Image (tube, helix red, strand yellow):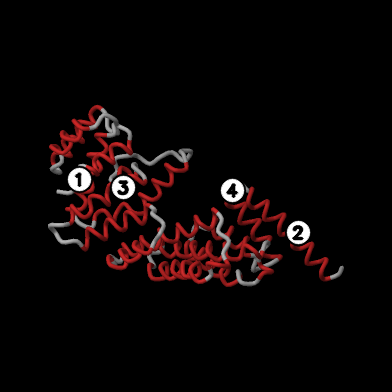
Amino acid sequence: MAPKKQTQDKNLRIVQLLTMAWNAKSVSRIISITDQILELNSNCVEALLLKADSIEDTNERTQILLHALSAVEEPKNLINPEEKNLFFMVLNHRLAYTYFLKENFDEAFKYCEQALNFVVEHESEIDYDDELIGVVSQLKTLRYRILLRHEDWREILAQTMRDGDKTLAWAYSKLIAAWATAGTNQRKSICAPMFWDALMLAPDVPFYMLGFFEEPDDDSDEEVLNDFEFALMFYDVISISNEFHDWFARGTILFGLLSGRFENEEYEYMVDALDSFGGYIEYQHMRSLLTSTEDSEVIETLAANKCLAE
């Protein structure tokens, strides 16, 4: 058989096996199929990525992802060479997140920066689709989380000034860094508008962060699951100080009461909690002003009346 025909047959078999792997229902089946692909091409990027995503051991996963990243530059290792940029970004994100899970934050930051710098340097060459835009957003979120871990407040503020994407990670990072760098007497007045802006992006997130809401079911709406995943990743940063935590809880409970998120015994408990945080008089005043429990109207009214600013 001619070499070209052999190559075509091998590539066709790889595509068939990849389709089987994507449709496989169990992790063991995915690993079994990707191993078959890697026997045909040990550098097949798609197979390496699929296998890495199926491996629980973070050390083994790291090695597979590093292998895939080293192979991505060679067109023959991709089913569709035009997707090289996408796979480069995805692999960097997977590596960054895996290192983050291993608490190797320097390596995690390195792979975030490598991918995001690539976007800046090759902007004219990159074909942005929804998937790539999503990967870039995830990389920025992880970078913010690492900077928060390092308490690099001034770099966070510099990043938020340059960042045109007003995401949850952008909003919460800006809020926390602003609190950490503001003078004691100015913190609340500076950060109150930032808190309401963050809340407007995803009103349920602080309730997950504070443990007021339970984990959503796996079959919940994608938006609900994304909110919970963000809260799970960022929840501990609201404990940078007791003062910030209590102020953050005060704003969350105030909004929760006015938007109808608490009922019956829970309502009474939250009213008492708000009183302990010094927000009861504010709550009574705002309740007299509001005519709706709709989220956006409540948040806009709270912001307009400078709630949390004192």
Few, some or many residues within 10 Å of mark 2 (<14, 14–19, 20+): few
Depth order, front residue of 41/123: 123
Mark 4, residue position: 26
Q: Earlier in the sequence, mark 2 or mark 4?
A: 2
Numbered tag placed on residue 209 in the rendering: 3
Give the residue number, with chain letter if any, for mark 2. Answer: 12
Q: CA distance from mark 2 to mark 1?
A: 63 Å
> Answer yes or no: do the residues labelled 3 and 1 have beta carbons within 8 Å?
no
Q: What's the residue at 42%, 42% (across, down)? A: 224
Mark number displayed over residue 306: 1
| Closer to viewer: mark 3 or mark 1 | 1
Q: Earlier in the sequence, mark 3 or mark 1?
A: 3
Q: Which of labels 4 and 1 is toward the front?
A: 1
Q: Secondary structure at mark 4?
A: loop
- Give the x, y percent position of residue 185: 12, 57
For marks 4 and 1, give the CA distance. Answer: 52 Å
Q: Amino acid at mark 1?
A: Lys
> Which badge, 4 or 1, is on the more N-terminal residue?
4
Mark 3 and mark 1: span between their CA atoms? 23 Å
